[in-house]
Image (tube, rainbow, N blue to C red):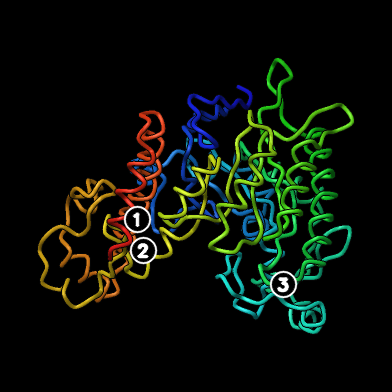
């Protein structure tokens, strides 16, 4: 089976659809569960599937370093290697360029708060020496040191594609350069232009090497990534260039990632700018976004897929989602609470495995006792909550009740 996207219903920018892949269908909008090193932390693939997850995304950079992309290839590819039978995705390693380069040693993230000052060119250049020890970007690619043993490695667009082909997911991302939200305009443009050149090289390599079915149709998809920071002119230019990019044979990207840096308050506006320009008949993935509030803004502005480590990362610290906001199960009040751990996204008692079988007091005990099972049970709940929240948003689009559902959910969620 080749890659196919169908829109089932559309309302303004938002839409509900289906992505067909060789390993199953992804009903969109959908949350993509992150399995960085070919594993969703603290969970088995069977547990991930049981909570409703449709697709898993692994990290190209980390699998390249350990165990090595060729080992994953020889193990039958990502899905077989990790015993996940559904659709799979891999990122390009571009975010690691950011985290080992512009973000290294600065506590920087892709999302900034309103009022944060951009770096001047001088500030940016002055800080370069701090992060060049781990990553250095040039026109051809990026050289970086392994976080495992300090050995030197190099990614180019072609190498990123080669590694992703070895890992063997259903959907890849083109190699890109992610920038800090505080980077100056001049550097945002430089990085965007470089991302465009890398995107063309990624697309050319992919089309020459992609696996094909008996009818010579590609069985793996490649998404191009739109960059441009918080700047309207850059974002729109990037969406146009990436949206229209093709090989010499006239083949373009199968879908698109909206990546890079955002101002938290303006993120949805940026997504709207981009999606008004990108081809409507292809899926859009909003990279690295996973907070419950953000799904509504992203979906309303045309995003189909989301991924983020937040649900499992928060779970491992005892922070759980509920319809009334996050709770910290380690708080004293939960030590003797023999009731429901948390509500589900519909405000009813959560029907995940954890909340069905255990009390708040028991889960609180596991965290206080530093038991490994604590991370497993909390991760089950958080992933169930997020995956099913997005499924409920999808259903609200089909039922023409999106705006009522959004209003009701956010009113309760933000109350806490």
Checking the image for residue 242, the label placed there is none
Q: Are marks 2 and 3 in contact (CB under 8 Å)?
A: no
Would you name the residue on which mark 2 appears?
A: 315
Q: Position of residue 335 (x, y in %)?
A: 15, 73
Q: Residues within 10 Å of mark 2 (few under 14, many from 20)?
A: many
With 143 as the anchor, is 383 left or right in this view? Answer: left
Q: Are marks 2 and 1 in contact (CB under 8 Å)?
A: yes
**Where is the N terminus found, in terms of image quarters?**
top right
Q: Earlier in the sequence, mark 2 or mark 1?
A: 2
- Say what secondary structure mark 3 lies in: loop
Q: Are marks 1 and 3 in contact (CB under 8 Å)?
A: no
Disc 1 versus disc 3: distance between alpha carbons?
31 Å
Q: Position of residue 64 (x, y in %)?
A: 67, 56
Would you name the residue on which mark 3 appears?
A: 102
> Which of the 4 quarters of the picture holds residue 339?
bottom left
- Say what secondary structure mark 2 lies in: helix
Q: Residue at x 75, y 59 (%)?
A: 177
Q: Residue at x 77, y 63 (%)?
A: 188
Q: Residue at x 49, y 40 (%)?
A: 55
Q: Earlier in the sequence, mark 2 or mark 3?
A: 3
Q: Residues within 10 Å of mark 3 (few under 14, many from 20)?
A: many
Disc 2 versus disc 3: distance between alpha carbons?
28 Å
- Say what secondary structure mark 1 lies in: helix
Q: Residue at x 84, y 56 (%)?
A: 194
Checking the image for residue 382, the label placed there is 1
Disc 2 versus disc 1: distance between alpha carbons?
6 Å
The front one of 183 and 57 is 183
Q: Earlier in the sequence, mark 1 or mark 3?
A: 3
The front one of 415 and 202 is 415
The front one of 100 and 277 is 277
Dot in front, 2 or 3: 3
Disc tally is: 3
């Amino acid at each position: 089976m080749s890659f196919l996207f169908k829109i089932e219903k559309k309302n303004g920018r938002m839409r509900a659809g289906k992505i067909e892949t060789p390993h199953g269908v992804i009903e969109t909008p959908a949350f993509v569960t992150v399995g960085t090193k070919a594993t969703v932390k603290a969970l088995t693939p069977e547990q991930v599937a049981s909570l409703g997850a449709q697709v898993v995304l692994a990290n190209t950079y980390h699998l390249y370093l350990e165990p090595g992309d060729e080992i994953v290839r020889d193990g039958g590819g990502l899905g077989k290697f990790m015993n996940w039978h559904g659709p799979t995705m891999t990122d390009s390693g571009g975010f690691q360029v950011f985290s080992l380069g512009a973000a290294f040693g600065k506590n920087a993230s892709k999302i900034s708060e309103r009022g944060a000052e951009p770096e001047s060119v001088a500030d940016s250049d002055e800080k370069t020496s701090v992060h060049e020890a781990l990553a250095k970007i040039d026109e051809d690619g990026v050289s970086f040191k392994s976080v495992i043993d300090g050995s030197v490695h190099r990614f180019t667009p072609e190498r990123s594609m080669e590694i992703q082909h070895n890992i063997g997911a259903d959907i890849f991302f083109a190699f890109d350069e992610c920038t800090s939200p505080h980077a100056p305009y001049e550097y945002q443009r430089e990085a965007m232009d470089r991302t465009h050149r890398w995107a063309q090289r990624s697309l050319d390599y992919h089309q020459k090497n992609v696996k094909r079915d008996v009818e010579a149709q590609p069985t793996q998809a490649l998404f191009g990534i739109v960059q441009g920071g918080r700047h309207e002119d850059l974002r729109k230019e990037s969406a146009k260039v990436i949206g229209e990019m093709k090989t010499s044979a006239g083949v373009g990207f199968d879908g698109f990632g909206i990546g890079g840096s955002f101002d938290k308050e303006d993120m949805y506006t940026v997504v709207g700018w981009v999606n008004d320009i990108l081809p409507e008949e292809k899926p859009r993935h909003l990279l690295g976004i996973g907070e419950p509030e953000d799904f509504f803004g992203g979906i309303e502005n045309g995003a189909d897929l989301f991924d983020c480590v937040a649900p499992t990362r928060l779970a491992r610290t005892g922070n759980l989602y509920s319809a009334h906001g996050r709770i910290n199960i380690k708080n004293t009040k939960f030590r003797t609470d023999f009731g429901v751990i948390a509500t589900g996204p519909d405000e009813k008692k959560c029907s995940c495995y954890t909340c069905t079988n255990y009390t708040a007091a028991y889960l609180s005990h596991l965290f206080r006792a530093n038991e490994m099972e604590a991370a497993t049970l909390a991760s089950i709940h958080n992933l169930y909550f997020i995956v099913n929240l997005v499924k409920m948003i999808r259903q609200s689009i089909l039922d023409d009740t999106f705006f009522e559902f959004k209003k009701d959910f956010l009113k309760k969620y933000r109350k806490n």
